[in-house]
């Protein structure tokens, strides 16, 4: 039998003592022995901080993004080896796709987010400058910096790849190393993916370590700069959350626990509507994908009493067509649970639900199990199981007991208010769904239940065509939930990166703030040079480089001509009497004329390194520009982002953000905004 090694302090090592055994979910065969006893676990924290942490923190966000993109490409190129191992956990090809390629997609997603939105720097200015004084020479800004700690990620058995990568992506992006502790029951798949990453040489040594087995006294050696995330049972999570070391050192702890997620069929939906079929398909899919071993799976199916019989029959018909068995058999659509212990646990919870008064409509015991093909009866198979609760308002068991497998319970409601009450009885969920074609029902349900859910999916015929489904967390959306669901958040785009960074308010003069953030702010010193900044390549432009333009006096002809050209004949610009009665007191220039005239003042029209206008941000019109007013523009380089050259034939370039202040004859700002330009770089850096 193979020994499943850990990767600690730069070496693959195996522990001592009594090992645990991992069995094949389909055949029951003993596959691996796992032990971490006696390994240098405390030393792994020091190694991560000193080796991986320092290397990652020295990389800019853009460099980290490129590292993660390269890792994702490498994993994608070698995915078939991971699929082969995934079958040992009882997963079908479709189940494995969500876990393996869904996890890899999360790496790609975070690399793309950072490439578009984060600076080419190690410090992240989080917001705009905040004036603290009348003359704005004492200002503040929040910045985010990498913490010199390590993230300890403790993961559940059901998603050994995605569970690791969805935590690892924001951790690495924040410049923090990680120690991964997968659930032992599926640790072989996590280990295979970690080995691929380590062998690729794409990440700094110490940026990733792996513990297969227990974590021993690791918590006792954590420090205040570290972070802990946990995915798994609420009972285990609660124990870890109150560990004395976490409390003593105020160590951030994020918990994501299994929850009794619900799916509500709206009162408006009848069997002849497309939404009815959407509902049946969604419930059946959530019961059977991953054999129901998902923290987001639908456990409580809330149905109008008038449609209960129709829903029962439709679900029974659909579940009867689900082929259960060895996932290598082509016609199989649902594989096994992770192991026999988990199967016994699911059966025990089903028995609790039955003993509470729930009726079993389908499945519910191993003697109801029918396997497809030559599937091995020694496997950890369990039949799709549908129960019915006749009195869900008084039966508390259906709102507190979760069978973590292909199990869901039907419950009826009399009106939408009661449906809302049933949804809330779950005491906090990761995800909830509402299937309805009625906007008013959607408004009523979502506004009332959003407070108890981390994510809500509203499905109608239109959304269902492209929906990713009830149980699919997405990198750009938060994953987590209140109460029973753990009270934490993961993912959510760049929000997750901030969890692993330190937010600090910096108070100083504008010039000091610009120097610290390497990003110019209004009021800071500027540099004026005789060469127009649009004549310079990306590398030649300096932060704070500024151009003060010539002046232009706005005439009545300007306003009339712009109105004719644009078609904008708003009365404040064109109607002398109407404008006199307006808040302006007289005719004023179009705001967009002011912006256009400003461009005419600061743009250098000759062919040069500026490739394109990339966009405009945060436009505000401060004061009206009247006939006879004179405007002038100060253009200042605010920040620069180097872009990766994707192909050798592409022109290497970067994005330059310019601060634009349009001033009147009294040097008062009349318009403030930022523009972005694509500027050619002198040297390329294409790497295949």
Image: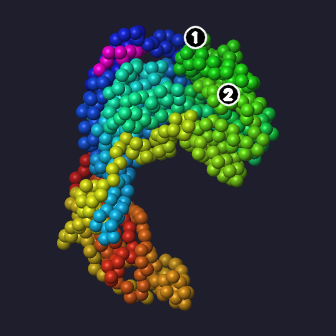
* Scheme by which the image is coloured: rainbow
Say if residue 444 shows up in the picture.
yes
- Which residue was labeled with disc 2? 397
- Image location (x, y in percent) of residue 236: 49, 26
- State which region is magenta: 32-40
Say if residue 203 shows up in the picture.
no
Indicate left or right for 97 with 539 as reference: right
Q: Main secondary structure of the magenta part?
A: loop
Indicate left or right for 392 with 102 as reference: right
Quadrant in the picture for residue 605: bottom left
- Residue shown at the point (27%, 29%) measured from the top left: 46
Quadrant in which the C terminus is drawn? top left
Indicate left or right for 651 with 339 as reference: left
Mark 2 secondary-structure assignment: helix
Frontmost residue, 165 versus 652: 165
- Calculate the distance from the C-alpha at mark 2 to the C-alpha at mark 1: 31 Å
Characterize the local packing of mark 1: few (<14), some (14-19) or many (20 or more) Cα atoms within 10 angstroms: few
Q: Is residue 102 above or below residue 653?
A: above
């Amino acid at each position: 039998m193979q020994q499943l090694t850990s990767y600690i302090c730069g070496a693959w090592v195996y522990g001592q003592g009594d090992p645990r055994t991992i069995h094949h979910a389909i055949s029951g065969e003993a596959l691996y022995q796992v032990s971490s006893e006696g390994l240098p676990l405390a030393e792994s924290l020091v190694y991560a901080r000193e080796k991986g942490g320092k290397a990652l923190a020295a990389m800019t966000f853009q460099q980290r993004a490129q590292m993660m993109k390269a890792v994702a490409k490498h994993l994608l190129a070698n995915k078939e080896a991971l699929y082969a191992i995934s079958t040992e956990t009882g997963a079908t090809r479709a189940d494995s796709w969500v876990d393996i390629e869904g996890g890899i997609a999360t790496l790609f997603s975070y690399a793309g987010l950072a490439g578009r939105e984060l600076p080419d720097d190690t410090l992240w200015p989080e917001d705009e400058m905040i004036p603290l004084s009348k003359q704005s020479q004492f200002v503040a800004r929040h910045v985010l910096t990498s913490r010199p700690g390590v993230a300890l990620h403790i993961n559940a058995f059901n998603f050994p790849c995605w569970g690791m990568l969805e935590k690892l992506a924001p951790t690495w992006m924040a410049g923090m190393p990680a120690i991964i502790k997968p659930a032992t029951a599926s640790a072989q798949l996590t280990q295979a993916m970690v080995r691929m990453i380590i062998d690729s040489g794409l990440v700094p040594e110490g940026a990733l370590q792996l513990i297969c087995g227990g974590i021993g006294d690791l918590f006792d050696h954590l420090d205040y700069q570290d972070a802990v995330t946990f995915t798994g049972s609420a009972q285990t999570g609660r124990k870890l959350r109150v560990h004395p070391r976490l409390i003593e050192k105020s160590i951030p702890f994020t918990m994501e626990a299994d929850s009794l997620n619900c799916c509500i069929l709206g009162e408006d939906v009848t069997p002849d509507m497309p939404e009815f079929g959407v509902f049946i398909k969604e419930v059946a899919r959530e019961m059977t994908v991953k054999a129901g071993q998902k923290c987001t799976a639908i456990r409580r199916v809330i149905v109008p009493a008038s449609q209960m019989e129709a829903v029962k029959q439709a679900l029974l018909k659909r579940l009867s067509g689900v082929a259960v068995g060895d996932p290598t058999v082509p016609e199989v659509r649902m594989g096994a649970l992770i192991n026999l212990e988990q199967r016994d646990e699911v059966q025990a919870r089903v028995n609790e639900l039955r003993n509470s008064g729930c009726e079993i409509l389908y499945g519910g015991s191993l003697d109801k199990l029918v396997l497809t093909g030559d599937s091995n009866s020694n496997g950890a198979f369990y039949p799709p199981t549908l129960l019915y609760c006749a009195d869900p308002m008084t039966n508390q068991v259906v709102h507190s007991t979760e069978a973590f497998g292909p199990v869901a319970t039907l419950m009826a409601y009399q009106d939408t208010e009661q449906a809302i009450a049933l949804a809330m009885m779950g005491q906090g969920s990761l995800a909830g769904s509402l299937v309805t074609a009625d906007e008013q029902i959607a408004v009523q349900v979502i506004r009332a239940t959003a407070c108890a859910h981390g994510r809500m999916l509203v499905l109608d015929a239109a959304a269902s065509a492209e929906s990713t489904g009830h149980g699919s967390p997405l990198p750009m959306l938060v994953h987590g939930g209140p109460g029973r669901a753990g009270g934490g958040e993961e993912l959510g785009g760049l929000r997750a990166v901030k969890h692993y960074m330190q937010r600090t308010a910096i108070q100083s003069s504008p010039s000091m703030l610009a120097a610290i953030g390497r990003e110019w702010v209004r009021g800071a010193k500027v540099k004026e040079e005789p060469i127009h900044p649009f004549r310079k390549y990306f590398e030649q432009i300096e932060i704070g480089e500024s151009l003060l333009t010539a002046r232009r006096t706005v005439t009545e002809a300007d306003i009339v001509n712009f109105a004719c050209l644009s078609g904008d004949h708003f009365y404040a610009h064109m109607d002398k009497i109407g404008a006199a009665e307006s808040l302006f007191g007289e005719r004023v220039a179009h705001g967009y004329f002011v912006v256009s005239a400003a461009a005419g003042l600061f743009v250098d029209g000759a062919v040069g390194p500026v490739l394109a206008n990339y966009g405009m941000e945060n436009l505000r019109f401060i004061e009206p520009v009247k006939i006879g007013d004179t405007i002038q523009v100060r253009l200042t380089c605010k920040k620069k982002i180097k872009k990766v050259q994707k192909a050798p034939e592409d022109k290497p370039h970067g994005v330059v953000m310019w601060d634009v202040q349009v001033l009147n004859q009294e040097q008062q700002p009349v318009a403030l905004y930022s523009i972005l330009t694509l500027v050619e770089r002198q040297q390329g850096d294409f790497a295949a």
